[in-house]
Image (spheres, coloured by chain):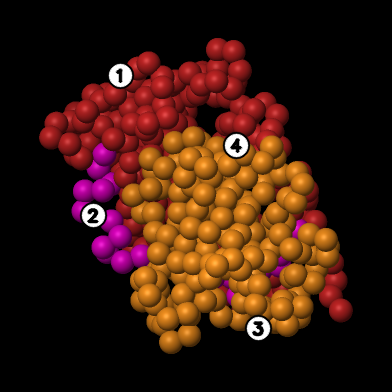
Chain colours: A red, B orange
Amino acid sequence: MSEPLGEVDLRSLDPPYDHPAYRSTTLRAPSRPLLRLAPDLTDPSGPVFGERTVGPADHDLTRQHPAEPLGERIIVAGRLLDTEGRPITGQLIELWQANAAGRYAHRTDDHPAPLDPNFTGHGRCLTDGEGRYTFITIRPGEYPWGNHPNAWRPAHIHLSVFGRAFTDRLVTQMYFPGDPLLPIDPIFNSVADPAGRERLLAQLDMTLTEPAWALGYRFDIVVGGRAPTPFEGMEHRR
Amino acid sequence: MSLPPTPQQTAGPYISLGLAPLSRPELVPEGAVGALVIRGRVLDGAGAGVPDGAVEIWQRPPAGTAAADWPGFGRCLTDPEGEFWFRTARPVAGSGDAPHLELLVFARGLTRPVRTRLYLPDEAEANAADTVLAGVPEDRRPTLVARAVGGQLLFDVRLQGDGETVFFG
C-alpha cells in the first residue's frame, strides 16, 4: 500500500550521532539509520511566543543578582535567519553557560572552581522585528571534563533556538575565535565540515562593542534547510 | 542566496540550567476534558535512564483553539530516572495522517536531537492507514505507538539497541 520510508543520508553540516571521540555518544547514539520524513503539511509550525514568555531583564545575565558577576563583560548579539537570509522574528532564544571560572551553577557540576553568587548563567530573549537578538553576559571560562585524560572544553555558550517550524529547532554551542582548545575538542569537531565549524565561531565585532564597557561578539544563527527540498509549487505551512 | 544552517551541538549535561526555566509539561490544565497524560522514560543502549535530557512535544492547535492561544510545544526535563511526563490535548488527525505528536529528545551524548512520533493505541484503524507508520518496518512500528495503562499513555524512548525507537530525519 505504501512505500517503505527511505534512509536519511547524513551529509548535512550537523554532526553524526555516533562520534566515538565524544564518549557519551557510545550508549546514546541511535544505531539504526534515520527514516526519511518528507516535509509535509502537518509539520507543526513554530510556537507563538508572547511578551510574557521572557522578562525585560532576562537577556542580561549580569543583572540577575544584587551585584555584577566576576569576569569579562561581553555582548553577544546577532540575527536569526532562515537559509534564504530572511529574518525570523518573535522567536525564542535560550542561553546557558559556565561562569568566568569555568563552573556551572548546576548541582551535578563538581569542578572545584568557585561558584559566583552573582552569576547563575541562564537567560532568554525573543528576536525583534528584524530577527535580532542581544545578550549581555560574561565570557565563560574553559573547564576540564571526564571525556578522556586531561580533557578541557573550549570556552562556549549553549544556545537553544526556535524557528518557524518544528524542523527548524536547533540547540548549538557558540565558541570564541582563536581559542587554542578548539582543534582538540571532540564536541566542536563532531562537525566534520570545516565550513560547519566556522559557523559555530562568534566574531569580534567593534560595531557591537560598547566603548569603555564591553566587547561585542556577533553570532548569526541560521535555521532550516535540513528537510529535503519540496516539489516546486508545493506550499509550505509556514 | 542560500546560507548554510548553523550545525547542531550537544546540549550537554547542564541542559536543565538553560531549559528548565521554560519547562512546561502541562499544555492543558488538570481536569481538561479529553486530556492525555503521557509518561515515559528516555533509556540508553544499556537500558539505563537518561537523567540529563529534555523531551519536547509539538502539536498543532486542537480543534476550536486559535494558534495564538495554544502553547505549541511542551517541554519536560528528564528526572534522575530518565522519566518525563506531559498533559496535553488529544492530537487531531491531519490529511492522510493518524493523530500523533511530534517528539524531540535532547541530551548529553546526543550530538543533535532525535525526532520521533507518538501514535495513539486506540486509533488502530487510523494507524493502519497512516502513510508514515506504513513506511516503517512492521517489527519496529510498535516503538511509535504509546501503550494505554491505567488511563495514561506510556511511551519510552530507547535511544539505542534492542527495541530502539524509530527516529526520523
Q: Is residue A209 left or right of residue B129?
A: left
| Main SS, magenta residues | loop
Respond whether the residues carrying marks 4 and 2 are from the same subunit: no
Residue B6 percent location from the top left of the image = 55, 46
Respond whether the residues carrying marks 1 and 4 are from the same subunit: no
Measure how far apart labels 4 and 3 are at the Cα level: 36 Å
Identify the residue shown where x is 75% and y is 51%.
Answer: B163
Measure how far apart labels 3 and 2 are at the Cα level: 39 Å
Q: Residues within 10 Å of mark 1 (few under 14, many from 20)?
A: few
| Chain to which mark 4 belongs | B
| Chain to which mark 3 belongs | B
Rendered image: mark on residue A114: 1
Tag 1's secondary structure?
loop
Which span is picked out in magenta? Answer: A35-61
Q: In the rendered structure, which amino acid carries the disc numbered 1?
A: Pro
Identify the residue shown where x is 17% and y is 36%.
Answer: A65
Q: In the rendered structure, which amino acid carries the disc numbered 2?
A: Gly
Residue B149 percent location from the top left of the image = 59, 66
Asked if B30 appears above or below A113 in the picture, the reply is below
Asked if A213 appears above or below B35 in the picture, the reply is above
